[in-house]
Amino acid sequence: MVSRRKSDLLSNLPDCLLVTIISLLPFKQSVQTSILARRWKNLCLETTNLVFKESEFVNLSTDTETIKSKRSLFVSTMCQWISSFTGEVIESLEFSLSEPVSFEKAIVSLTEFAASKQIKNITIDFSSPASRKIDVIEHLVTLMHYQNTKFDITRIFFNLIHVRNLTICSFLIQMIQECEDPMEMHDAMEARHLVMKTNLHANEFVGIKIFLNSCPELESLTFHMDATERIVRVSMPLDPKAFWLTNDTYACLERTLKLVKIKNFRGGPNELHVLKYLMRRGLVMEQLDLYEAKGLNDDQRRLVLTAAEEVQKNVERGSKHLRITLHKA
């Protein structure tokens, strides 16, 4: 009786509300709604929030061949879905895939789809899941794999020019450096809010500057420190301190960037080098938020406090309106 009442209640809802409900479901479950009844068959193709997550299809603890098969199924299902999409408006798109190489064509198609629908909120994540442990040998094999694979992301970012809220991973920050003359590879991006999942590793430094240069209207910048991010390219050794002591500046630092956040802040040297640069060159910065990482021991917490105090008291500021806040875990 209860299930029938629920069914009748859903049946009485207009299609626009059903689409809203389906938009809140994970991708796999939203597709499954198409078999509920004839009326539901194509409603999932009108959803307004798209979340394509590899983890819904692939169990990374299984054997390699099964993982490859399930990953291919995931990508092909996604491509089939976007080719059949009948909706008009998409508010957000999130896409995660732990091994993007060999799926470049599908990824470009997805970003072309996003551009055609003028999606303003996009997350692209090629991170390795936190639950998956990668040993040294596997890391070296992976590094060689990416170095020998031509993965051109120029077309991907060309399709993201009009995105307003963009979240990217370390893979893209590193690989954008492989493009020929990356500082001039496309028109200015319209991003107002940029989130970088990163380790702030030296291999990412040039990529970070490329994005600062490419987003002249950036208003907020968030570094989401993520220990699971992989190093996928070999770069020339550089001195992190010297790299960020440069006087290079960008339009967003001079005119629009008001908010900077570091999530999972640990007070490491590279975090401080980047922060000092942004504080020195950020002429209109108003707020710097440092979010302490969770699960730290006493020594690690003291390091965070020491680093926050140094930033608060001993760093040159380009903006007299800058406020600095440490948020305890």
Image: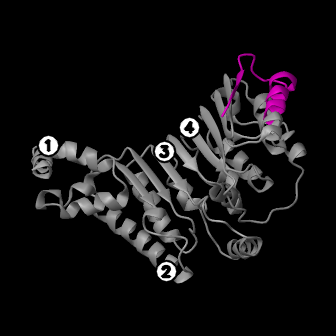
- As shown in the figure, which amino acid type bears the numbered disc 4? His
**x 61%, y 58%: residue:** 130
Q: Distance between the residues labelled 4 and 3?
A: 12 Å
Q: Type of residue at label 1?
A: Leu
Instruction: Identify the mark nearer the N-term, 3 or 2.
Output: 2
Which residue has dot 1 on it? 13
Residue 61 drawn in magenta: no
Please rate how many residues cluster around mark 3, counting C-alpha atoms within 10 Å: few if below 14, some from 14 to 19, many from 20: many
Question: Who comes first in sequence, dot 3 or dot 1?
Answer: 1
Q: In the rendered structure, which segment of residues is drawn in magenta?
A: 304-329
Q: What element carries label 3?
A: loop
x%, y% of residue 170? 66, 55
Of circles 3 and 1, the one toward us is 1
Residue 236 visible within the image = yes
Residue at the disc numbered 2: 66
The answer for how far apart the CA atoms under marks 4 and 1 are is 36 Å
- What percent of the width, then of the height, locates residue 162? 48, 45
**Which sits in the foreground, 105 or 126?**
126
